[in-house]
Image: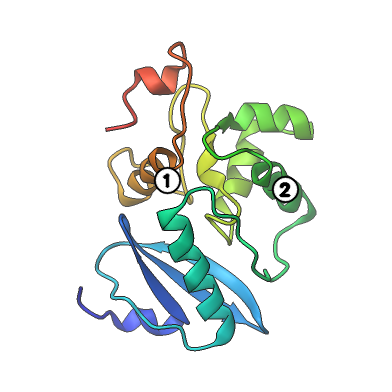
Amino acid sequence: MTPDPASAIFNAIVPAPFGALGIRSADNQVAELVYLPPAFAEKAPDNAVAEAAARQVAQYLVDPDFVFDLPLQPVGTEFQRKVWARIGAIPRGSVRTYGYLAKLLESHPRAVGQACGANWFPLIVPCHRVTAAGGLGGFSNHDDEHGFHLSVKRWLLRHEGATASSSSPWQQQAIWP
């Protein structure tokens, strides 16, 4: 991998099977996790929080049952935090639809999708476990079926052993290449 000057904004970059994860920290808390394409080179953590986050991300990439325990910066609106709490309750290996979460929150699927896209802590708040009723849905504010972000979502769901009933439209659409 070739170093990228943009990596200077991250306190650590952890290699992943799909590319890498950038970690930003501030005030002794994780400030953001970002999915990065393979062009980003690994970067050793430059502080204790980034080191703990890098270690935990690496553990998750080996063991999908790993439970994160990191200090997270408080971010998001009250609604986003409610959506993220519901997402955090989705068990590994399971998926829920935007519509299902919207009913629980007395909201709308699009609003749930926007809250998913605004997630500052992917993996820790596993928004990859939320799909559309008729397909994979978007991921990290991207919906290009063959793009990088949806390939990450597919990898994460496979890594966690996500399954769906044979009647599920997203399984029938062969989203698990």
Closer to us: 148 or 51: 51
At 43% across and 13% down in the image, what residue appears? 166
State left or right for residue 88 relative to residue 93: right
Callout 1 secondary element: helix
State left or right for residue 37 relative to residue 121: left
| Colouring used for the render | rainbow
Q: Is residue 78 above or below residue 71?
A: above
Residue 64: where, in percent of width, then height? 48, 48
Q: Quadrant of residue 143?
A: top left
Residue 40: where, in percent of width, then height? 29, 72
Residue located farthest toward the left when viewing the structure as drawn: 2
Could one spot residue 18 in this view of the protein? yes
According to the picture, the residue beneath numbered tag 2 turns out to be 85
Q: Quadrant of the N terminus?
A: bottom left
Between the C-alphas of marks 2 and 1, the distance is: 19 Å
Residue type, label 1:
Leu
Q: Quadrant of the C terminus?
A: top left
Residue 106: where, in percent of width, then height? 79, 31
Q: Earlier in the sequence, mark 2 or mark 1?
A: 2
According to the picture, the residue beneath numbered tag 1 turns out to be 156
Q: Residues within 10 Å of mark 2 (few under 14, many from 20)?
A: few
Q: Is residue 8 above or below residue 76?
A: below
Residue type, label 2:
Ala
Q: Quadrant of residue 113?
A: top right
Q: Residues within 10 Å of mark 1 (few under 14, many from 20)?
A: many
